[in-house]
Image (cartoon, rainbow, N blue to C red):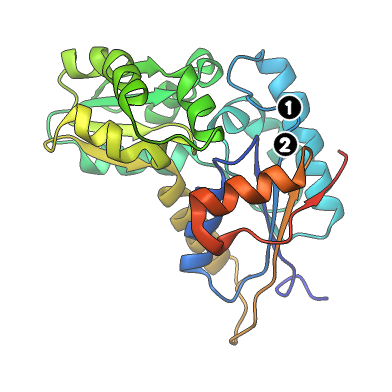
Amino acid sequence: MTQVDAPIGIFDSGFGGLTVARAVVDLLPNEDIVYLGDTARTPYGPRSIAQVREYTLQCLDALVERGVKALVIACNTGSSAALRDARERYSLPIIDVILPAAGRALMTTRNAHIGVVCTEATATSRAYNDALGAAPVTLTTAVAPKFVEFVEAGVTTGEEVLALASEYLAPLKAAEVDTLILGCTHYPLLSGVIGYVMGESVALVSSADECARAAFATLTRLDLLRKSPHNAERVFLTTGDPARFEGLGQRLMGGFVQGVAQVNV
């Protein structure tokens, strides 16, 4: 197998990265993908940065061993903890979710007030602060730990989710942000509730969609895209229960997730 014919490796701590995987497939339908969700150890958000870095690199190692041509870290928490280490560790192109989303937010904002809703670990890392750098904007961060729990339970609507969203997003509304980064790849699955609470005047930036666009641009620039139509193979792996992963994946993503296998990392 040539490098061009090798699959794209996509990693997430759990199910949220499936939003990235689907966006990648939509943009690059001829590319094979291997998705690895570390559902045995999710959520990463409450864990220490050091532990998240360790787990992320273990999972990326497992994808590299399968011969992928690029790595997509489809996890904001994993990106914030391990991106620098990963770029030193592997010779492959590595696409993260943080830099593309920050760039889109900068292009989108009209009043220079940007918000990010994310996990505790991502907030602690200040990865979005670093990504926005010296840009003349004000960044307000809100932590939404229980969002991940609801998505992983397959619950994306209802009074309890709406109440939580109103609580978590209150600081962002008070800061009058006009652009909100969904700083966890689980959160696009809650975009209906988040958009309702924030109001129609606030633009939502999906780190999942921006990550997929960055993957397209990176592989195009490096001439690593398949040149002809191909019946693409999609492999889904989990460190946890494959039946649960497939069931929840199909509930949240339609028929996109099939034939999930369990792996150890």
Residue 105's x, y, as percent? 29, 38
Q: Is residue 72 above or below residue 102?
A: below
Q: Do residues under tags 2 and 1 come within 8 Å of each other at their CB atoms? A: yes
Residue drawn at (43%, 44%), measured in percent from left and top? 100
Q: Quadrant of residue 87?
A: top right
Q: Is residue 152 above or below residue 227?
A: above
The one of 31 and 170 positioned closer to us in this rendering:
170
Find the distance from the CA under tag 2 to the CA under tag 1: 6 Å
Residue drawn at (26%, 18%), measured in percent from left and top? 166
Residue 93's x, y, as percent? 65, 53
Q: Is residue 8 above or below residue 127?
A: below
The one of 81 and 47 positioned closer to us in this rendering:
47
261 left or right, relative to 147: right
The one of 101 and 22 positioned closer to us in this rendering:
22
Of the residues shown, which amino acid type is indicated by label 2? Asp
Residue 51's x, y, as percent? 74, 18
- Return the residue at label 1: 41
138 left or right, relative to 249: left
Residue 228 visible in the snapshot = yes
Secondary element type, mark 2: loop
Residue 72 visible in the snapshot = no
Q: Quadrant of the C terminus?
A: top right
> Outermost residue, front direction?
159
Of the residues shown, which amino acid type is indicated by label 1? Arg
Residue drawn at (78%, 25%), measured in percent from left and top? 54
Residue drawn at (30%, 13%), measured in percent from left and top? 167
Count the numbered circles shown. 2
- Return the residue at label 2: 38
251 left or right, relative to 51: left
Q: Quadrant of the N terminus?
A: bottom right
Residue 136's x, y, as percent? 23, 25
Secondary element type, mark 1: loop
